[in-house]
Amino acid sequence: MTTDTITKATAAAPTGEPVLDARGVTMRFGGLTAVRSVDLTVRSGEIVGLIGPNGAGKTTFFNCLTGLYIPTEGEVRYKGTILPPKSFKVTAAGIARTFQNIRLFSNMTVLENVLVGRHTRTKEGLWSALLRGPGFHKAEAASRERAMELLEFVGLAGKAEHLSRNLPYGEQRKLEIARALASEPGLLLLDEPTAGMNPQETRATEELVFAIRDMGIAVLVIEHDMRFIMNLCDRVAVLVQGEKLIEGDSATVQNDERVIAAYLGEPFEGAPGEEEAAEVAQAEAAAATATEPETETEASPAGATDGATDEATDAPAAETGADETGADETEADDAGDGDGTDDAPAAPRADAPEATDDGDDDTAQASGTRKEND
Ligand SMILES: Nc1ncnc2c1ncn2[C@@H]1O[C@H](COP(=O)(O)OP(=O)(O)OP(=O)(O)O)[C@@H](O)[C@H]1O
Ligand SMILES: [Mg+2]
């Protein structure tokens, strides 16, 4: 209750200059348009939510913002400057992120994982590191001090020397946040920060995000937990089939019948992807009739308007889990995102590794295990 009051009060904080300005961002993978002409602005002092059904393109959009993908069309500006298409440069510019699939160096300690995230903020070069002169030691001490502060901030200082793989799931997510913060960002992107968390952990994460905003860092957060999003965000944008359906305050978004329909899988007039879905349904129905006339039950697949609709809408979820997961995993150095490791420039990375990791996100969350990355 108390927390509700606090969070609602802080959520009304005033907003300022644009920190992130994405214009007409489109991302195509072959014939699939995962993100279609999306505009989104995040201002300083804001917490903005990005929601949408599974497979809507949320993670892909994040990947376009952080240099993992080069958008097919559109441009992304951070504090007025067009971002370079490389992850480590984006991180250096001031955007940090966490991943839908936790990505930590499992055999490194908690503290070391955060130190990796300091990479883009340390000036010591190769020679300094090799010679280990006074400059290097001074910089290292400062980095450790800052990393410990951040661990304190997320509540993990007591576990600084633990191996990250031994942390419970919820704490691994917090560690990812600490590592992202280590790059001293002006904007933090969180991809499903509470996935797999229990209600207490979710509530704690909510408070953590408010505290991050209060530190002067704007936040853009993807989440499926509507209570979390609606309580936290000043503004919410809804993606459906790659298109921004609506953007507004939580009340506006919650009460919009198109949003409700999108989540329930009910078709509505002019829905993004409606035409394509109808074409697919038609083609599938035709194919089913031609090849297996006896299996009538399958003749009303996808776009159907009956009960099958829900399932049709849900279908992408499973697929996406896979793809999207892969998208993240691509960054073998995703630590890199926080850490500045160079994610190969890459035209849209159709990264093969993705397929490998598929679905692990869900699996990891369900089982309390996680994907290892190093
Ligand atoms: N690298 C890729 N190559 C081909 N298709 C991809 C790639 N990455 C994502 N996609 C496809 O783009 C669409 C959007 O996926 P994305 O992961 O962005 O969705 P999402 O909104 O994050 O979903 P979820 O809520 O399940 O995480 C999906 O159809 C997915 O299969
Ligand atoms: Mg996603």
Image (spheres, rainbow, N blue to C red):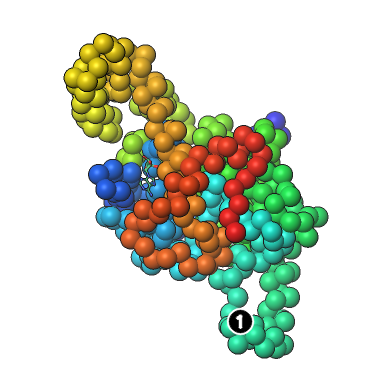
- The reply to whether residue 254 is in sight is yes
Depth order, front residue of 349/188: 349
**Residue 149 rendering spot, x and y as whole percentages:** 73, 62
Asked if disc 1 is less than 8 Å from ligand 1, the answer is no
- Count the marks: 1
| Residue drawn at x 40%, y 48% as measured from the top left | 60
Q: Quadrant of the C terminus?
A: bottom right
**Residue 289 rendering spot, x and y as whole percentages:** 21, 17
Q: Quadrant of the N terminus?
A: top right
Q: Which residue is mark 1?
A: 124
- The reply to whether residue 48 is in sight is no
Q: Amino acid at mark 1?
A: Glu
Picture layout, residue 31 above or below residue 161: above
Report whether 115 appears left or right of 331: right
Picture layout, residue 84 above or below residue 47: below
Q: Residues within 10 Å of mark 1 (few under 14, many from 20)?
A: some
Q: Quadrant of residue 131?
A: bottom right
Depth order, front residue of 240/247: 240
**Residue 27 rendering spot, x and y as whole percentages:** 31, 50
Report whether 208 appears left or right of 39: right
Q: Quadrant of residue 295?
A: top left
Picture layout, residue 311 above or below residue 57: above
Report whether 168 appears left or right of 253: right
| Residue drawn at x 49%, y 58% as measured from the top left | 331
Report whether 126 appears left or right of 79: right
Q: Secondary structure at mark 1?
A: loop
| Residue drawn at x 63%, y 58% as measured from the top left | 105
| Residue drawn at x 68%, y 83% as measured from the top left | 136
